[in-house]
Amino acid sequence: MTKEPIVSLENINMSIDGNQILKNVSFELEEGKFYTMLGPSGSGKTTILRVIAGFSNPTSGRILFNGKKINNLPPNKRKINTIFQDYALFPNLNVFDNIAFGLKLQRKNKSEIEERVNQMLKLVQLKGLAEREIDELSGGQKQRVSIARSLVLNPKMLLLDEPLSALDAKLRKDMQYELRELQQRLGITFLFITHDQEEALAMSDFIFVINDGEILQSGTPVDIYDEPINHFVANFIGESNIVSGTMVKDFVVNFVGKDFDCADAGMRPNEPVEVVLRPEDLDITDVDDGKLTVQVDTQIFRGDFYEIIAYDEDHNEWQIQSTNPTKDGATVGINFDPEDIHVMRYGEKEQDFDARLETYED
Ligand SMILES: Nc1ncnc2c1ncn2[C@@H]1O[C@H](COP(=O)(O)OP(=O)(O)OP(=O)(O)O)[C@@H](O)[C@H]1O
Ligand SMILES: [Mg+2]
């Protein structure tokens, strides 16, 4: 039996001044999971959060919380809290009072407030900083105050709008672990927004990829990385080599003038397709041992591998990650396994994509 979703969006559309900002957005969020909305700037991520939190009304569509329609429920009546990108802390209140603010509004008594705020300070590891002013905190500490201020109200769900984007790379990574750990410990549903694909892959149980107001694909990080639905997703998530080809028949695809065995099926015979090969799945070989022959253009040392850029006879660019350097201008082979090839249809929608995969996978 699948769990009843805590939040569902059903065919949410949103237009502002004749521009359609959200296009038929539908999804369900289960209790206790870490969800990420991943998409480029302007794709509609914040708008979706605002609709769920109740700060914006969709033009059409339903929002359900535990199966009940909440379209007309004001934000403060929804058991959902939001952490904004700029934290929106009260600069004139210290750490303790920032966290206590919501409880005071709820007219909780002093000893309960004290107990709950202290619990939160411990949870986000700010115990010694209760009396600190907000402008005497680092970015990561402000972030934690903001998390504590939301969690102290026992929300069923937390919406986080790019909360880590203002932090430097090291702190950002630390906070990724902390947030993930906190979410798992508390078992609250998180909907986290980012435009950073690595962050999305590292943190999430489930990812929604959004572009231009439309959810293009949803799935686990592994699903989306291994089986991107189209060019946009393949390019946005991870590094990809994408070349055009033809699906000869089930499990055989032609590109760069050759037939290759692959693990994909369910297209029309000779249907034009796009073929994805990830740089880390390619090996450099002698010309005789390679499935394709390429000429090396440049190589860059990236620390744990060399990133090699090469071109085939059709002038397709190939990015290859190799532990060994090669020579600029060298002609080499590249090798890969049939399972490393991923074939994409032009314009396929998620429902059709999922249904097609089900017919031949496992
Ligand atoms: N109040 C508004 N009036 C007009 N257009 C708006 C309004 N709010 C958002 N938009 C437009 O809707 C689109 C989606 O905006 P949204 O803020 O949801 O994007 P986003 O994915 O959160 O982007 P970012 O990563 O830059 O924060 C954008 O094109 C934006 O200009
Ligand atoms: Mg935004």
Image (cartoon, rainbow, N blue to C red):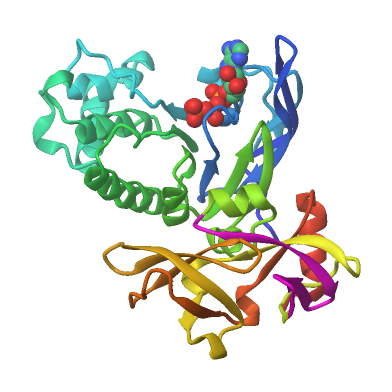
* Quarter residue 299 falls in: bottom left
Quadrant assignment for the C terminus = bottom right
* Residue 80 visible in the displayed image: no
Residue at horizontal 13 percent and vertical 28 percent from the top: 130
Looking at this view, is 60 or 213 the one in front? 213
Where is the N terminus found, in terms of image quarters?
Answer: bottom right
Q: Residue at x 66, y 17 (%)?
A: 57
Is residue 163 visible in the rendered image? The answer is yes
Q: Left or right of 356: which side holds 170?
A: left
192 lies above or below 255? above
Please state the horizontal and vertical placement of residue 253, each as a whole percent of the image: 77, 74
Position in image of residue 279 (x %, y %): 49, 67
Task: Determine which quarter of the picture holds residue 343.
Answer: bottom right
The answer to whether 141 is drawn above or below residue 176 in the figure is above
Q: Is residue 25 above or below residue 337?
A: above
Specify the segment rendered in magenta: 238-259
Q: Residue furthest front?
A: 329
> Which quadrant holds residue 47?
top right
Q: Position of residue 159 (x, y in %)?
A: 48, 34
Q: Position of residue 301 (x, y in %)?
A: 29, 64
Q: Nearer the viewer, residue 174 or 149?
A: 174
